[in-house]
Image: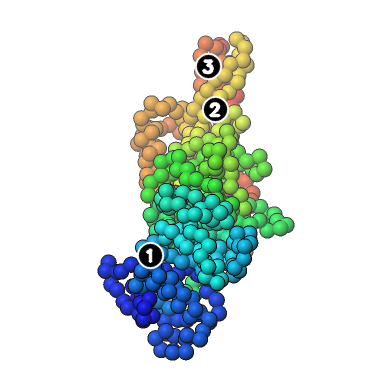
Amino acid sequence: MRLLNTSTLLFEEFLGTDIPAYGILSHTWGEEEVSFKDMTTEPSCKSKKGYAKISMACQLAKADDLQYAWIDTCCIDKTSSAELSEAINSMYQWYERAEKCYAYLVDLESSPAWRENLARCRWFTRGWTLQELIAPADVYFFDQNWNMLFRKSEGIDVLSSITGIDKGVLGGSRLLMSISVAQRMSWASRRVTTRVEDEAYCLLGIFDVNMPMLYGEGRKAFLRLQEEIVRISPDLSIFAWKASSPQPIDYEGPIACSIFASAAVNFAESGSFASANTHSTNDFIISNQGIKLNTRLETLVDPKQEGRRYVLPVCKIDDGTLLGVRLRKCGASQLVREDPWALVEHSLLFQPMQSRMMYLLIRLPPAQSPKYLVRDIVLYTRSRILQIILPPEIRVMDVWPWSRWDLTDQVFFVSDNLAVDYAAARIGGVFNVATSNGRVDFRLDFMLYSLRWANTGSEQPLYTIVPWKPSDIILKSFNDNLEQFDLLSSMVEYELGAYKIPMSSSTSYEIADSDYSIRVCCSSHLVNDPTKCAVPFWKLELSWTAETTAG
């Protein structure tokens, strides 16, 4: 660490943990700042405007019996990319370890009205000064004439009001890492940096992560920051962001977006969001397919849109209400966020699912439309589909393989490999049947298996309906294999025979204490619907009838 001697104003370097006590300056950059090169090679640097800040910071530190001071403008050799990267990754710790921190508000005039003008200071709008306020145990604030105004410890209420930062964090009674990712992001949402990459780099200490500096990468820096946060934190609130809705919205359908925000400003409304990892969540893994995680989604019936939607709960608000993001299946186990302008409030319409392994897309797959409509991305990833049409009394309870099931369209799909065209669904519901003893409710569950539905020629797909019970070990074992192994449909057909699962297009259930039964039947139809798939596809339609068994 390179420090300025407060008596000689010469640099001294210290390595490892052998670093003396020092004062540190927090300020906003302006005209004629003095660089490391200026201080070491240009005697005329004392005439620059920025030199006065260096001189005053050293005087303040010396008055506080500190032999050294650190000022970012001159203590970093910015011509060395390695040194700059080390400094940026160490910045939070350097401010945290400082004996005294002096915040210089260059645009705050010396006036009895300084309290009214404080919130308008540029210092509160810059990205780098966020960590410079949080990291030190205390901060001493000075106006443009270097009059000491107040200390952070004395102004926690007003500082929290201006910045949105939690009072406990400012006062040191609450650990920074106990605050949700979304809340911490919100503190930076109204701050700006001169270079777009610094919007991410200035937050490394706030999230206790490190990453190399790649000036020139632009917005990718903020994407990399979120990837690093995910590597160390299971907090789903990192996904609790909203983009500003364009006005007016040229609505052609739901829009797809990355699961990550494009900028800190997307967290502007996340200041009250708390972590809500209410479901078991295993490790996050960053892969070339997206964020791999194992978690429990919920399903939502959206009256404004056709079909059901997957929802991932990501945070909760003050009253305990959960908020989530809508997801859409767009590839094998791949889900893309839809509607970047909204979070979904939890309601009784939500239905929890069992935990699943999935990939949340960071980068979107190709789409025909530059608007990234969800339907375009979904169609791009489907080569063939099988649609399941059910009467209103029953619904799909579970599916195998879940990786290739789209809840919204109620379809199984394949992408490149058409030979894996197999599907299994557990279907159940309650039928209200008129019998000679009056109307009765009858619950039934059954399995629907189908094979060879990627063939859209004259040969119809194979399918069978089999009664299902939770105690049926054979069917459970068979279904587990369908989920665990990416089998060819020919192998599944062989396994159906090996497990002695009969092939039948219908099944009957006798209603207890009556002379009636319910028959469930399945039929197949080749249809053409370009909103579901670019080519014709098979549709399996289930129906039921109540029959008398009286002879």
**For discs 2 and 1, the disc positioned in front in the rendered view:** 1
Residue 230 visible in rendering? yes
Q: Identify the residue under disc 2.
A: 429
Query: Residue 176 location in percent, x, y?
Result: 43, 53
Residue at x-position 40% and y-position 76%:
75
Q: Considering the numbered disc 2 on the image, is that residue within a helix, a strand or a loop?
A: strand
Within 10 Å of disc 1 (Cα), the crowding (few <14, some 14-19, many 20+) is many
Q: Identify the residue under disc 3.
A: 511
Residue 197's tag is none
Residue 228 visible in rendering? no
Q: Is residue 175 above or below residue 347?
A: below
Q: CA distance from mark 2 to mark 1?
A: 66 Å
Which of 98/278 is in front?
98
Q: Identify the residue under disc 1.
A: 98
Name the kind of residue labelled 3 in the image: Ile
Question: If you read the primary sequence from the N terminus, does the residue marked by circle 2 or circle 3 appear first?
Answer: 2
Name the quarter where the N terminus is drawn. bottom left
Q: CA distance from mark 2 to mark 3?
A: 14 Å
Name the kind of residue labelled 2 in the image: Gly
Q: CA distance from mark 1 to mark 3?
A: 79 Å
Name the kind of residue labelled 1 in the image: Ala
Query: Residue 321 location in percent, x, y?
Result: 55, 39
Residue at x-position 38% and y-position 33%:
476
Residue at x-position 36% and y-position 81%:
8
**For discs 1 and 3, the disc positioned in front in the rendered view:** 1
**For discs 2 and 3, the disc positioned in front in the rendered view:** 2
Which of 341/299 is in front?
341
Q: Considering the numbered disc 3 on the image, is that residue within a helix, a strand or a loop?
A: loop
Circles 2 and 1, Cβ within 8 Å, touching? The answer is no
Question: If you read the primary sequence from the N terminus, does the residue marked by circle 2 or circle 1 appear first?
Answer: 1
What is the image's colouring? rainbow
